[in-house]
Amino acid sequence: MMLVSMNEVLREPCEKGYAVGAFNAYNLEALQAIIEAAEETGKGVIINYAEVHAPLIPIEEIAPLMIHYAEKASVPVCLNLDHGTTVESCMQAMRLGFTSVMIDCSALSYEENVETTALVTRLAHSVGVSVEAELGHVFTSDIGMEGVEEDDAEQMDVSSMYTDPDTAKDFVEKTGVDALAICFGTAHGIYKTKPVLDLDRITEIREKIDMPFVMHGGSGLSKEEFQTAIRNGIRKVNYYTYMALTGGKAVKDAMDQVKEGESVFFHDIPKIAREAMKKDVVEAIRIFSLEA
């Protein structure tokens, strides 16, 4: 059985200075692609179930499938709730067998973030589950900033939303989390404009606290940007958008090749997406492992 906690998956990367990939599974094909890619590369992996994917499939329906594949994998696999926003959602994931939870209260006040994160950490640690939290604000949207128009984005001081090193130290000491998602300019979703990254901020935070740091919103960065961030202290990289786009593009390209009058069987479509996503995840793992 290779279902392990996030702490266990991160042990070797922390010792050797590389990062583990954390990939979102929202259906069987994504799950198979991630497991197969991890086994091909021989690297441990974190499989995320994002709370926002509940409309696609409820966590209670996909959890048994995730556990089944994790337990029979030949590499260490951690199952992580991604961006859980409440104590209740984190507790549900723990009860279902997840070995890690991310409690994301970054939209709340600092005091509320500390209080809720500390509570989740105490509950999770009592049953051997690892905890990730977020400090700062990882932007969301095509332009990288939720609710901000592009012209306004150019004028505002986005660095004010980045993770402050001293605040990060205080947060970790008060909450006891195992990993911290930090903000230094990345964004969830597709970049419409090139992100402005403060990669030195990772080093500055690392000088204050020695723990695994997490990068969210990494899809679309260059290999060099990924690897600089990893060398500066990132130990877990969340990666979803481009994996999903790769699967979708593969299906579209295949359908574009279908001649008029030619039959298309639905059972062929998931296979096309799975194989494309696996290839993309293999490449991502090699980049995060500093092997590419």
Image: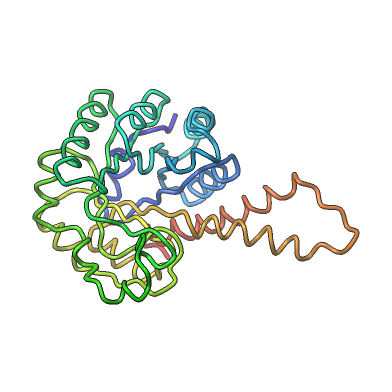
- Residue 187 appears in which quarter of the rendering? bottom left
The number of numbered badges drawn on the structure is 0
Residue at point 12%, 57% (across, down): 165
**Residue at left offset 69%, top offset 61%:** 252
Q: Which quarter shows the N terminus?
A: top left
Residue 222 percent location from the top left of the image: 40, 70
Residue drawn at x 18%, y 64% as measured from the top left = 160
The answer to which quarter of the image holds residue 186 is bottom left
Q: Is residue 37 above or below residue 76?
A: below
Which sits in the foreground, 2 or 148? 148
Q: Quadrant of the C terminus?
A: bottom left
Q: Which residue is painted at 34% across and 69% down in the image?
A: 225
Horizontal side of 197 relative to 175 (left or right) equals: right
Depicted 11 relative to depicted 97: above or below: below
Q: Is residue 25 above or below residue 234?
A: above
Pick out the residue farthest to the right.
261
Residue 214 picture location, percent across and down: 29, 52
Q: Is residue 64 left or right of residue 20?
A: right
Report the coloring of the rendering: rainbow
User: Where residue 87 sits in the image (x, y, percent)?
Assistant: 29, 31
Q: In which quarter of the view is residue 284 placed?
A: bottom left
- 255 with respect to 78 (left or right): right
Query: Residue 10 placed where, x, y %?
Result: 30, 45
Q: Nearer the viewer, residue 233 or 180?
A: 180
